[in-house]
């Protein structure tokens, strides 16, 4: 099957909006929803913050996919990796994939942890508390390593089957999240629509747990918007939308944002509230026991499947990122190594308990390359410079993208360390800043060569 890795997707191979609706629904109703929903409660959001803030933030994410990512994807119809190579040269892909592979291992670790927690209930393992960073028992380590090993083997040898299973499981997972949310409402005392607002203010009471950042309305908006910034502002979904017949198919992202990042997050928060109602001292965010308390065996199955369907492709992508650096390496072996790294990360529940920050850091590291692509596409030719400069000049590495990437991240680090700007807000200055740095560096770099100027 021709995947058009190094050529534009032909027009006769483009697809309608239906496939994109299913794809976003399957990718964004998954394991981490069961972490993020409770962590909003632990972060002390109010009912207004979460219900309205998620509406606004998810809308901004959908609009970013539609008006920033999809138009560039439809114009060039290239993968993210090939488009970056044309801009910055083959060596920049090596740098990008080292970062990408490490970050995918971190995400895969969280997904493996979620899936493994489904077995905590039947095995009666003690659950990690919200303040725990390391494992609390040998049994926990053994279960996580066993689940992770199975996931890594499947990712190395059977990714096609996993993808088919994920697509089949997606409608069931959406339905189960809805059912769980409805089942949790009576336990919380909701008997009518009039009861919901009163109960919502009790669930999301505005009081952060110890050692957690106090979230406000703007935290919720920015997390919902930037939680997937690697895919929209960072242009990761160029690879997906290159198959879109029209740029407006970016609106299909609403299927994932409002089913997964609205309904599922709120549902998971309600499940956490039921847990706290049963035992106010039990502040642990462990998806398996959380879902079991409301839905029994069906809850365990949902957690197991949701973790499985996201951990497998995450380990697979990490392996591909590392293997692309050295194509002669065995993909199976590299994927197993990536799975082993993810398992080591998964045994530390503290990382999963800080998943809101982990997701932000993941996006921030990859986001500057999206600004580079945006400026290269929209501004360079208009300002008398060449787009896709590395390809036109025959360069193995074109430095302006690297400079923009490194400087913008260093400035983010400075804003966070010296001025106390939280990671949830750093994308607001960092993305345009990366674009400006790339523009200036390109002007200086191209003016010193014979190629400079539009072509």
Image (cartoon, rainbow, N blue to C red):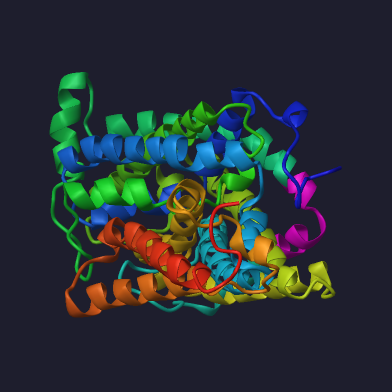
Q: Name the residue located 52 percent from the left edge and 63 percent from the top edge.
A: 107
The spot of residue 195 in percent (x, y) is 16, 25
The spot of residue 285 in percent (x, y) is 37, 58
The spot of residue 38 in percent (x, y) is 33, 51
Confirm whether residue 368 shows in the render: yes
- The quadrant in which residue 265 appears is top left
Q: Please check the rendered image and state whether residue 375 is part of the magenta-colored stretch, yes or no.
A: no
The region drawn magenta spans 149-162
Q: Residue furthest front?
A: 450
Camera-nearest residue between 110 and 436: 436
Q: Name the residue located 26 percent from the left edge and 78 percent from the top edge.
A: 414
Q: Report the number of discs.
A: 0
Q: Is residue 117 above or below residue 338?
A: above
The spot of residue 215 in percent (x, y) is 19, 55
Camera-nearest residue between 248 and 352: 248
Q: Name the residue located 27 percent from the left edge and 60 percent from the top edge.
A: 429
Q: Is residue 108 above or below residue 21?
A: below
Q: Name the residue located 38 percent from the left edge and 75 percent from the top edge.
A: 407
Mostly what secondary structure, the magenta segment?
Answer: helix
Q: Is residue 303 above or below residue 130?
A: above
Q: Is 45 left or right of 336, judged from the image as shown?
A: left
Camera-nearest residue between 258 and 379: 379
Q: Please check the rendered image and state whether residue 160 is part of the magenta-colored stretch, yes or no.
A: yes
Quadrant holding the N terminus = top right
Q: Is 413 left or right of 170, judged from the image as shown?
A: left
Confirm whether residue 123 shows in the render: no
């Amino acid at each position: 099957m021709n995947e058009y890795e190094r050529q534009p997707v032909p027009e006769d191979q483009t697809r309608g909006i239906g496939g994109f609706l299913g794809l976003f629904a399957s990718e964004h109703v998954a394991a981490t929803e069961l972490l993020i929903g409770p962590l909003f409660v632990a972060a002390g959001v109010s009912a207004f913050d979460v219900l309205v803030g998620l509406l606004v933030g998810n809308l901004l994410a959908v609009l970013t996919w539609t008006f920033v990512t999809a138009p560039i994807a439809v114009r060039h119809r290239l993968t993210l990796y090939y488009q970056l190579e044309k801009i910055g040269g083959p060596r920049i892909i090596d740098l990008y994939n080292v970062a990408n592979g490490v970050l995918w291992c971190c995400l895969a670790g969280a997904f493996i942890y979620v899936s493994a927690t489904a077995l905590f209930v039947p095995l009666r393992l003690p659950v990690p508390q919200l303040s725990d960073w390391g494992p609390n028992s040998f049994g926990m380590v053994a279960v996580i390593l066993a689940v992770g090993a199975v996931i890594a083997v499947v990712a190395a040898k059977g990714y096609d089957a996993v993808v088919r299973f994920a697509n089949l499981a997606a409608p069931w997972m959406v339905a189960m999240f809805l059912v769980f949310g409805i089942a949790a409402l009576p336990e919380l005392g909701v008997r009518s629509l009039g009861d919901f607002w009163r109960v919502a203010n009790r669930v999301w009471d505005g009081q952060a747990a110890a050692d957690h950042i106090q979230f406000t309305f703007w935290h919720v908006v920015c997390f919902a918007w930037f939680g997937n910034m690697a895919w929209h502002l960072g242009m990761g979904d160029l690879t997906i939308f290159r198959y879109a017949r029209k740029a407006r198919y970016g609106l299909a992202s609403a299927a994932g944002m409002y089913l997964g990042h609205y309904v599922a997050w709120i549902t998971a928060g309600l499940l956490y509230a039921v847990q706290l109602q049963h035992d106010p001292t039990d502040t642990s965010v462990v998806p398996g026991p959380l879902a079991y308390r409301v839905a029994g065996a069906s809850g365990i199955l949902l957690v197991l499947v949701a973790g499985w369907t996201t951990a497998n492709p995450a380990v697979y992508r990490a392996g591909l990122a590392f293997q692309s650096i050295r194509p002669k390496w065995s993909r199976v072996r590299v994927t197993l190594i990536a799975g082993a790294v993810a398992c080591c990360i998964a045994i530390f529940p503290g990382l999963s308990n800080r998943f809101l920050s982990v997701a932000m850091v993941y996006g921030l590291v990859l986001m500057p390359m999206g600004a580079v692509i945006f400026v290269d596409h929209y501004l360079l030719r208009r300002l008398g410079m060449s787009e896709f400069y590395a390809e036109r000049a025959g360069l193995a590495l074109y430095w302006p993208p690297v400079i923009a990437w490194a400087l913008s991240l260093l400035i983010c680090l400075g804003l966070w360390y010296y001025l106390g700007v939280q990671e949830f807000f750093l994308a607001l200055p960092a993305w345009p800043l990366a674009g400006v740095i790339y523009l200036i560096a390109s002007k200086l770099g191209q003016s010193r060569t014979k190629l400079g100027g539009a072509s």
